[in-house]
Amino acid sequence: MSTSPQNNIYRSVIDLKSATSNEIYSLFESAMQLKNGFTGQKDIPQRGIAALLFFEPSTRTRFSFEAACARSGVYPLVLSGAAGTSLEKDETLEDTILNIEAMKPLFFVIRAPDALNMREMAEKIHTPIINAGWGMQGHPTQALLDMLTVYENFKTLEGKKVLFVGDIKHSRVVSSHLELSRTLGYQVGYSCPASFLPYSVDRDVMYFSQLKEGLQWADAVVALRVQKERHGGAKFSVEDYKAQFSINKATLEYLNTDSIIMHPGPINYGIELEKEVLQDPRSQILKLVENGAFVREALIRQVLQRIS
Ligand code: NCD
């Protein structure tokens, strides 16, 4: 989100470390303007193509980036998983990106495992990269859409308390929130089994070994999916986890009436959250998805401005 037209890394959005609070609030403002003025119909000239490379599975993030491209006059060319591509013939992720760059997309949107060094890639190529989820490193647009939603609810972010419940250790969503919270001044809390805590916990982060205490503290609770695909086959007991950290009707009794409930999706019902939670008036789970498309549209428009 920084501006330095010479260097591609500054036109890319790999993390949120250098984004200023003014830049973020102006992004939120454009996202809200796009949302409020949305009619479902747009007649805008096509400006070119974008390459959306999803090397890891995705539903919400991929569709919302596709929608955001279409609504900003950019045609999205989408790679969704290795099937049917030369990745099945052992082509590297890096070669895939270099070859697609040769077709001159305006920008890339990339979701990739840790194995790809997205930051180095953005330094190597000339086309901006928007990070759509990078291994355990970060998921900047998810943190932005989460906080736009908190902002929409509370009209301020300063001092707000955001509690993450679940697999914190493997969550790229949490990594991006740690960066964003420093800039926007909200507080981060964790509630999870000790085995789901990252190796080092930031000094400013509150830890609640008892879910009930975390819920009493929180303005917003974010339930996280247990990232089994990043556990390297380690055993995980659903029953033990649920007994202590399930977000359900009973545990939500401890959450304030004006606090909100979030989940980045996909939800694994019966593990981190029970289906009944969707009926809770405090749930903003689908609102997050709605806001995600507008935040991504605002971000794409910003990137297009930077390269024009
Ligand atoms: C998250 C992701 O991919 O990091 N989902 C998302 O982008 N909506 C969270 C997850 O996979 O659990």
Image: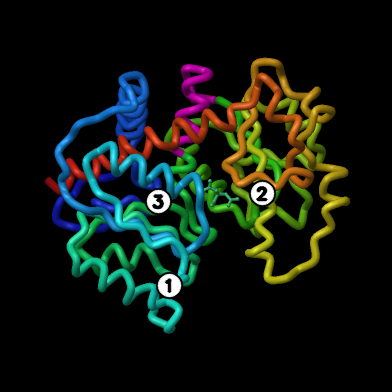
Q: Is mark 2 within 8 Å of ligand 1?
A: yes
Amino acid marked by disc 2: Arg
State the separation of the CA atoms marked 1 and 2.
28 Å
Give the farthest residue toward the left: 308
Residue at 32% over, 76% down: 95
The numbered mark at residue 15 is 3
Quadrant of image for the N terminus: top left
Query: Along the polypeptide, which appears first: circle 3 or circle 1?
Result: 3
Residue 203, x across and y down, in percent: 61, 45
The numbered mark at residue 225 is 2
Residue at 25% over, 73% down: 99
Picture layout, residue 66 above or below residue 148: below
Tell me, yes or no, whether the two marked residues, 1 and 2, touch with CB atoms within 8 Å: no
Amino acid marked by disc 3: Asp
Q: Which residue is mark 1?
A: 84
Of 111 and 27, which appears nearest the observer?
111
Picture layout, residue 98 above or below residue 221: below
Q: Which residues are magenta?
A: 144-159
Q: Callout 1: helix, strand or loop?
A: loop
Picture layout, residue 131 above or below residue 94: above
For the stretch drawn in magenta, the main secondary structure is helix
